[in-house]
């Protein structure tokens, strides 16, 4: 797919991927600001802002924002992660201008009415409480908090009930001033929209936004903590996490790490953990590994749920698989299968135009570029078995793994 990168004089970057084969347009603002950028007294603020962006601008009331795209069968949404916020929309191609104008309005001209802030605080507190009903979610939040003690990278995105209640309009304005700056924002469009339409939108709307630069201090993570803890909780089965800190987006081996995770316990049913522990032994209904990269660090985790009587057996089998990956390079055929599997997953993800939009915007934020599928393919196919083995050894055994387990009370 052909793409254009347009750099505006005010610092905004525009990424346009034209796809004439579809009837829709998917566009959004990717903002280099998330919960990691919150100060100690701002826990939950980035997520609160995401909620409140839809609650009124100088031109529109909340119901007008919500119905603007719904009335033409479109969708508008947003999400917050630890390092980014995304506000995006999907519409029929003929409504691109309507969607883009709305996104500009709520991203740069929201008014944040006090009553709406209070309402969203209540909604977020309900969201926090709903997460408490899911032990795997609570477990993951606690694991990351322990892995990065005292650092915003370890804090939950939602905040706590106490922290969210203390946030207000002054906090929102302060965060926006520090982080929603034109040098930290990318506008992305994927779909059946001609380049001339994008250039017109840039001239009429985006170029009118005043230039601004972020005064955010450099993101610096604290050292990794190690822990091993078993806790009695109100759960029906064991919920367990094994993991550690690992490489981030800034490391050239990140795609090898994705491949390693895929082989071990990624989304495919033929992962080693799934085949050995679930299919062969029947010890787990659900077991997976995850690699979550951040700008300068990453988290590797293995999660499983099992009956209490199987827990020690599962743990031993997991460590056995880790040792095999760290000790024995994969055979050529096994590596080739793993590479093709990863490329297939990437290709399928790019077929989902919303996922492609988000991934492309993130690439621009992190690297100020977008790799073509052919470039990604060359990179993945150049990964060697020894590189994967060494990465497994460095990740799993050159520093101690951490363990957090919830057992039935």
Image (cartoon, grey):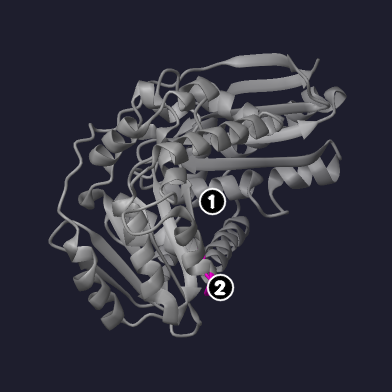
Q: Is residue 213 left or right of residue 160?
A: left
Q: Which mark, by number, is residue 171?
A: none
Instruction: Give the extent of the magenta segment.
Output: 71-75
In percent of width and height, residue 378 lies at: 41, 65
Image quadrant where one finds the N terminus: bottom left
Using the image as rendered, state which of residue 119 and residue 402 is in the foreground: 119
Q: Which residue is mark 1?
A: 259
Q: Is residue 4 magenta?
A: no
In percent of width and height, residue 2 lies at: 35, 78
Q: How many marks on residues?
A: 2
Q: Is residue 237 visible?
A: yes
Q: Which residue is mark 2?
A: 73
Q: Quadrant of residue 199?
A: bottom left
| Secondary structure predominantly adopted by residues drawn in magenta | loop
Residue under the point 57% across and 67% down: 348
Q: Quadrant of residue 100?
A: bottom left
Image quadrant where one finds the C terminus: top right
Q: Earlier in the sequence, mark 1 or mark 2?
A: 2
Residues under numbered marks 1 and 2 in contact, where contact means CB atoms less than 8 Å apart: no
Q: Is residue 33 left or right of residue 233?
A: left
Q: CA distance from mark 1 to mark 2?
A: 38 Å
Is residue 210 placed above or below 372 in the rendered structure?
above
Q: Identify the secondary structure beneath mark 1.
A: helix
Residue under the point 45% across and 38% down: 115
Extreme-left residue of the structure: 9
């Amino acid at each position: 797919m052909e793409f254009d990168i347009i750099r505006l004089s005010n610092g905004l970057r525009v990424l346009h991927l034209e796809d004439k084969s579809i009837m829709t347009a998917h566009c959004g603002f990717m903002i280099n600001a998330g919960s990691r950028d919150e100060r100690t007294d701002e826990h939950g603020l980035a997520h609160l802002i995401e909620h409140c962006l839809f609650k009124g601008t100088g031109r529109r009331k909340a119901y007008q924002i919500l119905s603007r795209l719904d009335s033409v069968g479109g969708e508008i949404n947003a999400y917050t992660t630890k390092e980014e916020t995304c506000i995006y929309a999907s519409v029929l191609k003929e409504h691109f201008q309507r969607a883009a104008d709305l996104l500009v309005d709520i991203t740069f001209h929201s008014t944040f009415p006090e009553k709406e802030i209070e309402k969203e605080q209540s909604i977020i507190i309900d969201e926090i409480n709903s997460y408490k009903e899911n032990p795997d979610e609570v477990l993951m939040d606690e694991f990351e908090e322990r892995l990065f003690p005292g650092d915003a990278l370890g804090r939950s995105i939602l905040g706590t009930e106490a922290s969210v209640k203390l946030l207000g309009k002054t906090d929102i304005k302060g965060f926006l001033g520090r982080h929603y700056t034109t040098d930290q924002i990318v506008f992305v469009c994927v779909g059946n929209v001609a380049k001339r339409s994008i250039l017109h939108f840039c001239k009429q709307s985006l170029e009118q936004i005043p230039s601004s630069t972020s005064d955010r201090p450099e993101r610096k993570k604290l050292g990794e903590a190690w822990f091993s803890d078993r806790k009695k909780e109100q759960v029906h089965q064991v919920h367990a996490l094994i993991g550690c800190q690992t490489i981030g987006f800034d490391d050239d081996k990140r795609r090898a790490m994705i491949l390693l995770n895929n082989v071990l316990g990624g989304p495919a049913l033929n992962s080693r953990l799934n085949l050995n522990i679930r299919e062969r032994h029947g010890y787990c209904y659900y077991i997976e590994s995850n690699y979550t990269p951040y700008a300068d660090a990453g988290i590797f985790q293995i999660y499983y749920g099992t009956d209490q009587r199987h827990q020690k057996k599962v743990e031993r089998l997991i460590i056995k698989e880790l040792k095999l990956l760290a000790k024995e390079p994969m055979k050529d055929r096994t590596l080739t299968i793993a590479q093709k599997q990863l490329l297939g997953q990437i290709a399928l993800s790019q077929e989902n135009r919303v996922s492609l939009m988000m991934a492309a915007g993130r690439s621009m934020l992190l690297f100020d570029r977008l790799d073509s599928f052919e470039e990604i393919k060359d990179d993945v196919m150049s990964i060697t078995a020894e590189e994967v083995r060494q990465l497994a050894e460095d990740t799993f055994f050159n520093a101690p793994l951490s363990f957090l387990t919830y057992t039935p009370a």
